Image (cartoon, rainbow, N blue to C red):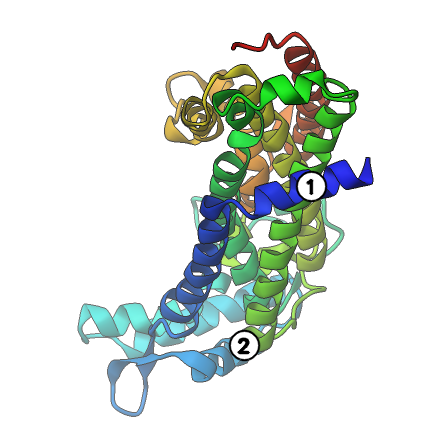
Amino acid sequence: MKDMIKAERTKIMLRKPTKILFIAGVILTLAYFFFLQFNYASVYYDYDTGKMSTVSGFAAVEQRKEIAGLFEGELTQDTLERIQQKLNEAENATKGRDENSVFSATHVYRDQAAILEYVMNPDGSLKELQAAYPNSKSVILGYCDGWDLMLSGMGGVLSLLMCLLVVIALSPVFAEEYSSHTDSVICAARYGKTKLVTAKVIASLETVVGMYIVYLFLYAVLYGGFYGFDGWNVSIQSSLHYASSTYAITFLQMFLISVALNILGIIALTVITLFLSAKMGSPVSALIISCVVSFLPVLFDFTDSIPILQKMQEICPIFMLHINGVFAAMKTYAGIIQPIIMIVFNLGIGVVFYVLIKKTFKRHQVIA
């Protein structure tokens, strides 16, 4: 079995589209990080010149740490008052100035302003923190850009890359055997319709999960090396993306949960793609259908028209890779939180489609 798995894994990894896409993914990750994140110019108000200015790179990181340090620690009513005070000071300092100056003065407090906006009632009064965050004994604020941006990248660029890698690298696993007519040799072999199927599934999973781990290591090196791993123990509400979230978790916990759900989502996408490959007569057909099935749930938004359909879409495998969006707001399914439902649903997909792969290939008829 080990030799069969190794042979199938080598076959997948040596395909030219797999190698090209994997290398392109590394290049895209580096370009996205350096051009759209680390070296992206962030605006702030320069009190010395009285104008909007920009900062990027390590200077921007230091500025973000300094701002976050002003409100570091447990979120209390006093913290909220200090946030309001800083925003008022920024607005007063830019009275009568242009819009860019006004915006840049308050923009540096965007994470804290998001919390203040969330806990503020329509009449301007503040909610009790226990009511705003009912699942948390306390909310701990602090600098978290390394973790926040890494999770954002994992839910964006990395999720897209992994979906493409799965469908492009794995669509030919069975279908290529059919189109090249080597299926007659395989099916005639002793373990052609039994152990070989399992070997193909295991080899496929080893390949795509291995690529995911390589990408994950690259993300950790980039974001940890340039932004630092500070903030692993602060609440996710420290970032404006999760200011209104009621999940009582830290950034490290969110990262570990995200990795586990990502891998489970990759497994689900893998067995679906392999089933379609085993079902289709050509790699091209398998690739097209796999792309449609994989990406369809994110192409349409039924939030306003058919909410129940939208909620069903949001537990599909591709959303397991875009997991940072799940933690932005807590959604429940019959009282059960979304991540738990996603785990159960995608585990079910894994088991069902693995059985279907074995049955489909076992029933396959060789065409001369």
- Residue type at mark 2: give it: Phe
Query: Residue at 78% across / 41% down in the picture?
Result: 3
- Where residue 354 appears, x then y in whole percent? 70, 21
Quarter holding residue 270 = top right
**SS of the residue under disc 2:** helix
Above or below residue 156? Residue 356 is: above
Query: Residue at 49% across / 29% down in the picture?
Result: 294
Query: Residue at 62% across / 38% down in the picture?
Result: 266
Sequence-first tag of 2 and 1? 1
- Where residue 168 appears, x then y in whole percent? 47, 37
Say how many tags the image has: 2
Outermost bottom residue: 48
- Name the one closer to the observer, 27 or 86: 27
- Residue type at mark 1: give it: Ala
Question: Residue 129: in sight, yes or no?
Answer: no
**SS of the residue under disc 1:** helix
Q: Residues within 10 Å of mark 2 (few under 14, many from 20)?
A: some
Cα distance, mark 2 to mark 1? 39 Å
Question: Residue 341: in sight, yes or no?
Answer: yes
Query: Residue at 50% across / 63% down in the picture?
Result: 112
Q: Which mark is residue 40?
A: none
> Which residue bears the numbered disc 1?
7
> Which residue bears the numbered disc 2?
226
Above or below residue 40? Residue 204 is: above
- Where residue 1 appears, x then y in whole percent? 82, 35
